[in-house]
Image (cartoon, rainbow, N blue to C red):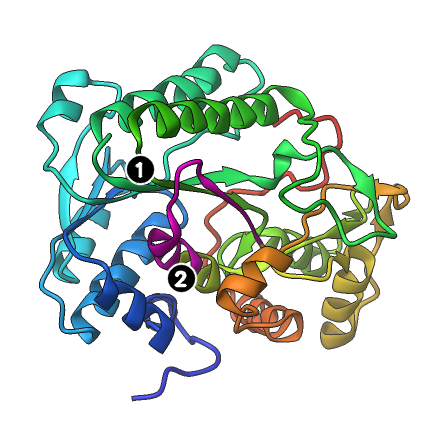
């Protein structure tokens, strides 16, 4: 049955986010062994786990897809198990719990801390640097896809196409610095242990319940000013980003594959707000002015490996707009994309 372009409720939205493409079916069919998803309780993890389960089933591959998290969201664990995903409740900082996790040749590492960094700097560094090291040592014989962030790049001129993976890094603020440190620790262990890895510099994944487009839409819908300080953004539909993460298991390498994961080109925040305003018959209000630089990424390498994302900006704006119009649920987790000082 075809998945509707616009999901009228969360059940259909979750179904869409977990519907595999032929490319994902082929990738999960080509990979042998079980899949362990660490830090699976966040915004993207549940959908990634479901996507992996369905792609594996569609490929006719018998494997365990195991989601590991603290599962603080009520009902999430039961929902995943109902969809055929095994779950393990664990604090990954507990070395005894980490040691008892099942062996798996395929690992997707999603744990990280961004929001709440200010005032919790020590915890941020522990989550983003120490924990990845512990995980990489524990799963030295696995292939590991680890999520990173485009925040490792400096603010760059908006006239260009953004930094590619060979561009100099220049993280602004302690969150971004710790994210770069995560990459360096993983790079070191990949070479020391011979562990093939892929590091995904993501910015920004979106779907109707969260993300940059939802942040902008909420402000236009409620008549609040849209901050233009970070005047341009790259975005990618969450299902596309999760699909890239699963397909990247086939491209893990030593030294690690580094991959910007996002859509291109970058889009004007003003233009995005105006699209919502045109749809709703209300003129957006704006605060600040567009800077000459922004946090941008060039995803040409991703496009060359995997093709362009399946959902373009117009479709993303339309889906978010329809969701907001209906009073659709928000996860209540603003991205902070407008922050130029790296404080989250």
Give yes or no for residue 254 being in the magenta stretch. yes
**Residue, far top:** 122
Is residue 316 at least partly visible in the picture? yes
Q: How many numbered marks does the figure carry?
A: 2
Mark 1 crowdedness (10 Å alpha carbons): few <14, some 14-19, many ≥20: many
Is residue 229 at least partly visible in the picture? no
The residue at 46%/28% (across/down) is 113
Circle 2 — which element? helix
Answer with left or right where residue 146 lies relative to residue 153.
left
Q: Which mark is residue 243?
A: 2
Q: Nearer the viewer, residue 54 or 196?
A: 196
Q: Position of residue 315 (x, y in %)?
A: 60, 75
Q: Disc 1 versus disc 2: distance between alpha carbons?
A: 17 Å
Q: Nearer the viewer, mark 1 or mark 2?
A: 2
Give yes or no for residue 240 being in the magenta stretch. no
1 and 2 marks in contact (CB < 8 Å) = no
Mark 2 crowdedness (10 Å alpha carbons): few <14, some 14-19, many ≥20: many
Q: Which residue is mark 1?
A: 39
User: Can you say whether 92 is above or below 145 in the image?
Assistant: above
| Range drawn in magenta | 243-261
Considering only order in the chain, which callout, 2 or 1, is on the residue closer to the N terminus? 1
Residue 112 quadrant? top left
Residue 9 quadrant? bottom left
Answer with left or right where residue 72 lies relative to residue 305.
left
Circle 1 — which element? loop
């Amino acid at each position: 049955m075809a998945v509707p372009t616009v999901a009228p409720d969360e059940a259909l939205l979750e179904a869409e986010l977990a519907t595999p493409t032929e490319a994902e079916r082929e990738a999960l069919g080509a990979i042998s062994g079980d899949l362990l998803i660490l830090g699976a309780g966040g915004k993207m993890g549940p959908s990634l786990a479901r996507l992996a389960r369905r792609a594996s089933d569609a490929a006719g591959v018998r494997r365990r897809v195991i989601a590991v998290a603290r599962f603080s969201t009520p009902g999430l664990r039961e929902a995943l198990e109902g969809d055929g995903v095994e779950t393990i409740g664990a604090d990954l900082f507990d070395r005894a719990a980490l040691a008892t996790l099942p062996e798996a040749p395929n690992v997707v590492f999603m744990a990280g801390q961004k929001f709440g960094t200010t005032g919790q700097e020590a915890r941020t560094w522990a989550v983003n640097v120490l924990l990845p090291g512990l995980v990489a040592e524990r799963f030295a014989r696995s292939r590991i896809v680890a999520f990173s962030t485009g925040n490792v790049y400096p603010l760059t001129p908006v006239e260009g196409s953004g930094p590619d993976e060979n561009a100099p890094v220049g993280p602004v603020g302690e969150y971004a610095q710790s994210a770069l440190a995560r990459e360096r620790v993983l790079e070191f262990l990949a070479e020391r242990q011979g562990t093939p890895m892929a590091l995904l510099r993501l910015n920004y994944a979106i779907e109707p319940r969260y993300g940059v487009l939802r942040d902008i839409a909420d402000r236009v819908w409620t008549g609040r000013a849209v901050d233009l300080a970070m005047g341009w953004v790259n975005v990618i539909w969450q299902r596309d980003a999760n699909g890239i993460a699963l397909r990247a298991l086939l491209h893990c390498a030593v030294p690690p594959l580094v991959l910007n994961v996002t859509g291109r080109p970058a889009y004007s925040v003003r233009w995005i707000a105006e699209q919502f305003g045109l749809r709703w018959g209300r003129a957006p209000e704006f605060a600040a002015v567009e800077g000459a630089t922004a946090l941008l990424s060039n995803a040409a390498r991703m496009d060359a490996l995997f093709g362009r994302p399946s959902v373009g900006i117009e479709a993303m704006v339309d889906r978010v707009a329809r969701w907001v119009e209906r009073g659709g649920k928000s996860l209540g987790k603003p991205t902070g994309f407008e922050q130029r000082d790296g404080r989250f």
